[in-house]
């Protein structure tokens, strides 16, 4: 209940509401609280930024160690030394070296998926869409070479590198990329352009073809002397598309 009279301050539920003089005396204290809160927010943002930077520092060191020494010799200690961090610091971010390399794999696959997904909005038809996906994969192998090499390193022998549970984790991320190809092929089927009842199998064939050709590019000077790689790459994609249009693959 609210009571009031001229001689006494306002009282609400038996508690005195502070008057103007009291509020003015509390103003410096309240300003300090605001400053402390602002400082806390600033500290949190700096902490988040430091975590991101430290995480990137560890990932970069892991890449260098992996390519220089190989997976068996890529120890946490060696990664820590390369990153110029303590071993304990690495363990505060990752449980094991396998976790670090899984993070590298996942990061690469996420970047690849984003690059391929950009082609969706620009594709005029199913044929153009798949050609742009193929071009995006080639661009990823050139501009994201470290990530492409990491994917290739683990895709070549995943069963010998990771235990089954960790391998499944990587496979789930790879499936996200594969599903983009499946969707593109399925769209062509729905529009009557492609003729197949197995879009996922064709998606696997396309990815394997693109990946294999890019790997062969490393031996371009010896296996394909004088060949224009871009022309060869486009021919492979066009051949795949012709088979899809004609329904030539009875898979």
Image: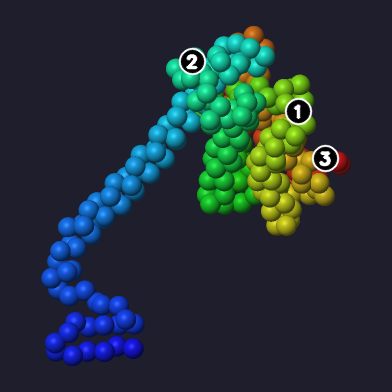
Sequence-first disc among 1 and 3: 1
Distance from disc 1 to disc 3, alpha carbons, whole Å, reads 34 Å
Secondary structure, mark 1, is loop
- Packing grade of label 1 (10 A; few <14, some 14-19, many >=20) is few
- At a point 55% along the width and 14% down the height, the residue shown is 78
- At a point 53% along the width and 31% down the height, the residue shown is 93
Sequence-first disc among 2 and 3: 2
Q: Which of the two marks, 2 or 3, is nearer to us in this view?
A: 2
193 and 67: which is toward the camera: 67
Residue 251 place in picture, x, y as percent: 86, 41
Does the image show residue 52? yes
Furthest-right residue in view?
Answer: 250
Secondary structure, mark 3, is loop
Residue 192 place in picture, x, y as percent: 73, 56
- Packing grade of label 2 (10 A; few <14, some 14-19, many >=20) is some
Residue that carries the numbered disc 1 in the rendered image: 163
215 and 110: which is toward the camera: 110
Residue 83 place in picture, x, y as percent: 47, 19
Residue that carries the numbered disc 3 in the rendered image: 249
Sequence-first disc among 1 and 2: 2
Residue 91 place in picture, x, y as percent: 56, 27
* Residue 17 drawn above or below residue 247: below
Q: Classify the position of the N terminus by image quarter.
A: bottom left
Secondary structure, mark 2, is helix
Kindly check if marks 1 and 3 are in contact, taking CB atoms under 8 A apart as contact. no
What colour scheme was applied to this rendering of the protein? rainbow
- At a point 58% along the width and 30% down the height, the residue shown is 94
Residue that carries the numbered disc 2 in the rendered image: 82
- At a point 73% along the width and 57% down the height, the residue shown is 190
Distance from disc 1 to disc 2, alpha carbons, whole Å, reads 26 Å
163 and 192: which is toward the camera: 163
Q: Which of the two marks, 1 or 3, is nearer to us in this view?
A: 1
């Amino acid at each position: 209940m609210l009571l009031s009279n001229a001689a006494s301050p306002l009282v609400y539920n038996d508690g005195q509401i502070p008057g103007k003089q009291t509020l003015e005396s509390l103003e410096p204290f309240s300003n300090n609280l605001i400053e402390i809160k602002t400082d806390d927010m600033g500290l949190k943002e700096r902490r988040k930024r430091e975590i991101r930077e430290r995480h990137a520092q560890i990932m970069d060191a892991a890449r260098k160690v992996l390519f220089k020494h190989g997976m068996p010799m890529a120890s946490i200690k060696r990664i820590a030394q390369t990153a110029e961090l303590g071993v304990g610091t690495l363990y505060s971010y990752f449980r094991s070296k396998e976790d670090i390399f899984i993070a590298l794999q996942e990061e690469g696959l996420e970047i690849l998926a984003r690059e391929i997904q950009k082609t969706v909005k620009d594709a005029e038809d199913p044929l153009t869409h798949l050609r742009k996906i193929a071009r995006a994969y080639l661009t990823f192998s050139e501009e994201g070479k470290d990530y492409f090499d990491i994917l290739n390193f683990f895709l070549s022998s995943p069963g010998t590198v990771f235990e089954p549970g960790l391998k499944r984790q990587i496979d789930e991320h790879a499936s996200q990329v594969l599903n983009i190809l499946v969707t593109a092929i399925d769209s062509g089927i729905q529009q009557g352009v492609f003729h197949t009842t197995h879009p996922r199998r064709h998606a696997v064939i396309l990815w394997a073809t693109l990946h294999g050709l890019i790997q062969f590019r490393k031996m371009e000077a010896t296996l394909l002397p004088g060949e224009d790689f871009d022309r060869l790459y486009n021919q492979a994609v066009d051949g795949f598309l012709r088979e899809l249009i004609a329904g030539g693959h009875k898979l």
